[in-house]
Image (tube, rainbow, N blue to C red):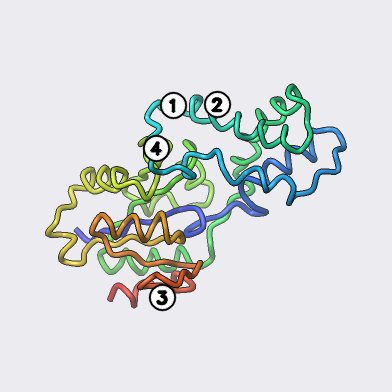
């Protein structure tokens, strides 16, 4: 099987206006009292507390969407408390982040995605997603019109492991019946925008990786846009 494993956020799609800090800031401006807190002040407090910030720690206990979001709500509430909101108000704001972040009207796909997926599919490649993301990732994929391209969606929120943890790659490869022979033949690749999560994680699992959109000096393979992927695979 010729298989391409794709990251989602930052590779295929993105949240217009920004992701986590932007969502917290939007809630604060819409729902909270006038605080004078700036975006940068809030951003300082969203750099930890998410499962992918500690990928070496499995989170199998967050086994439902409600449990996953409940754990994140404390991260959001802590951020709000850190910029001056009282505990009760911070918790109220934190509960509103989920729907704000997930608003399908905010999600976009990059312009180069569909032409490249069409070309690669025509060349015999199969596609799956392997992403560190929220439980509702399939809904976001549908919102940007990409569901039909992917045979499976492997999501850290469902699997309990975050890239670059080796177990998340093992689970995806096992489910797709990908063996050592396929990997040695160059028939399996990872494509993503994170050097640590996508490139280092995949290469540790014996999968060659292509870094896209965000350069890193240690990446062996890098292209600015997805338009270069078919040639690099060729």
Decide which of tag 1 and tag 3 comes sooner along the chain: 1
Residue depth check, mark 2 versus mark 3: number of the one nearer the observer? 2
Label 2 and label 3: CA atoms lie apart by 40 Å
Between 48 and 30, which is closer to the camera in this rendering?
48
Check the image and name the residue furthest to the left. 181
Say whether residue 140 is left or right of residue 219: right
- Residue under label 2: 70
Residue depth check, mark 4 versus mark 3: number of the one nearer the observer? 4
Badge 1 marks a residue whose secondary structure is: loop
Query: Disc 4 vs disc 3: Cβ atoms closer than 8 Å?
Result: no
Label 2 and label 4: CA atoms lie apart by 18 Å
Picture quadrant of residue 229: bottom left
Residue at screen point 52% across, 52% down: 144
Label 4 and label 1: CA atoms lie apart by 17 Å
- Residue under label 3: 228
Say whether residue 227 is left or right of residue 19: left
Decide which of tag 4 and tag 1 comes sooner along the chain: 4
Quarter occupied by the C terminus? bottom left
Residue 21: give x, y in percent of width and height.
66, 46
- Residue under label 1: 64
Residue at screen point 87% across, 37% down: 34
Residue depth check, mark 1 versus mark 2: number of the one nearer the observer? 2
Decide which of tag 1 and tag 2 comes sooner along the chain: 1
Badge 3 crowding class, 10 Å Cα cut-off, few under 14, some 14 to 19, many 20 or more, is: few
């Amino acid at each position: 099987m010729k298989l391409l494993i794709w990251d989602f956020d930052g590779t295929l799609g993105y949240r217009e206006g920004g992701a986590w800090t932007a969502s917290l800031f939007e809630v604060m401006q819409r729902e909270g009292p006038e605080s004078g807190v700036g975006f940068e002040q809030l951003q300082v407090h969203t750099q930890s507390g998410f499962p992918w910030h500690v990928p070496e720690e499995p989170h199998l206990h967050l086994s439902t969407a409600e449990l996953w979001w409940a754990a994140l709500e404390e991260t959001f509430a802590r951020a709000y408390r850190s910029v001056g909101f009282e505990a009760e108000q911070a918790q109220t704001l934190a509960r509103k982040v989920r729907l704000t972040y997930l608003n399908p009207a905010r999600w976009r796909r990059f312009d180069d995605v569909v032409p490249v997926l069409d070309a690669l599919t025509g060349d015999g490649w199969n596609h799956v997603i392997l992403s560190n993301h929220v439980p509702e990732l399939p809904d976001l994929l549908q919102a940007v019109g990409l569901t039909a391209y992917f045979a499976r969606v492997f999501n850290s929120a469902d699997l309990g492991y975050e890239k670059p943890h080796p177990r998340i790659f093992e689970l995806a490869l096992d489910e797709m019946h990908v063996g050592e022979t396929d990997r040695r033949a160059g028939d399996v690749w990872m494509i993503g925008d994170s050097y640590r999560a996508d490139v280092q994680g995949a290469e540790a699992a014996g999968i060659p990786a292509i870094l896209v959109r965000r350069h890193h000096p240690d990446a062996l393979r890098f292209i600015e846009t997805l338009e270069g992927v078919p040639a690099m695979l060729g």
